[in-house]
Image (tube, rainbow, N blue to C red):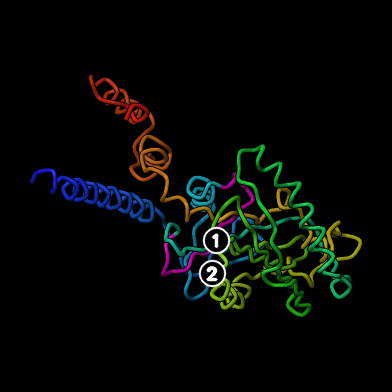
Amino acid sequence: MKNIFLPFLLCFFYTASFAQEVDSTQLFLDAIEQSLNYETGTIELESRNATLTVPEGFRYLNREQSMYVLSDLWGNPADTSVLGLLVPENKGVLADDSWVFVLSFDELGFVEDDDAEDIDYDDLLADEQKETREESKQRVQMGYEAIELVGWASKPYYDKEKKVLHWAKELKFADAETNTLNYNLRVLGRKGVFVINAVASMNELPEVKSSIGHVINSVEYKEGHRYADFTPGVDQVAAWTIGGLVAGKILAKAGFFALLLKFWKLIAVAAIGFGGAIWRRITGKPKEEEHLAEAETTAIPDEPTESEA
């Protein structure tokens, strides 16, 4: 009779153990979220040439926290050009359906927009796909996932009156089941462009598109930095035109990030958090104390390591 109930007992204990691990992981994710300091209202951007009025339905993370989210949590290459993140107020950065707008400023000079109506975006897409295949090889060599440009998620469009360029790319990372959306906005100014990039999955495309108008209006150049303030013969003219902005290389241009958090929960918490930079950020524990704790743990006899378990 005991043998009959053994499979059920094993199933019960396995389920209970798995539930405990899930609960522990969720507590860890909640602790990360609570460690972030979200802001609302009007933000003085570190680029010093514009202000950001956080649009309704969003919260703002400053440069330091944004780089932490993008690199430490999401696994992207470090990018010091990032100014901040706009995060939907009803979602955290580690939620299953999370997405964000990444803000940065590219001081590339005054972008002339005379070519906006002459660009063949189908030909441009074919060139982009070819270049992406080459750049994907570089990503793999750098230790990141391979990438494929599937196509336009939203065909490029230039609003000449507002001086804002829109386009969206559908991207596939390695063997990911869900494709990534990069919805790009470039707000032209006197000395460069604000790069506003929605990083999401393709499932969030309708939600992202519905927010575009509010986000565009949230960034306001200060007097003397607007597109209309350009002074011929004095200000630098960018080597990039409108077509050049869309064709900017993925690895070379600011504003390109991968939404890797959907796979983040699949990694063991101990492997990426406890004993690492993420755990120090949450607890505020100095690195020296952390090493001491690790030494005390490893000194316990007969305790199997993770590699032995």
Amino acid beneath label 1? Thr
Assess whether mark 2 and mark 1 are in contact (beta carbons under 8 angstroms): yes
Secondary structure, mark 2, is helix
Viewer-side label of 1, 2:
1
**Can you tell which quarter of the image residue 119 is in?**
bottom right
**Can you tell which quarter of the image residue 281 is in?**
top left
Mark 1 highlights which residue? Answer: 178
Mark 2 highlights which residue? Answer: 203
Amino acid beneath label 2? Asn
Q: What stretch is highlighted in magenta?
A: 76-92
Give above or below for 107 relative to 116. Answer: above
In the rendering, at what x and y percent does residue 292 appear? Answer: 31, 25
Q: Which residue is drawn at 35% across and 41% down?
A: 284
Q: Which residue is drawn at 62% across and 57% down?
A: 172
In the rendering, at what x and y percent does residue 211 appear? Answer: 56, 75
User: Label 1, label 2: how many angstroms apart (C-alpha)?
Assistant: 8 Å
Give above or below for 150 relative to 268. Answer: below
Q: How crowded is mark 2: few (under 14 residues within 10 Å), some or many (20 or more)?
A: few
Q: Which residue is drawn at 13% across and 48% down?
A: 4
In screen coordinates, is 196 left or right of 307? right
Q: Residue farthest to the bottom?
A: 161
Taking depth in this image into account, of 141 and 89 the one nearest to the observer is 141
Secondary structure, mark 1, is loop
In the rendering, at what x and y percent does residue 44 appear? Answer: 56, 62
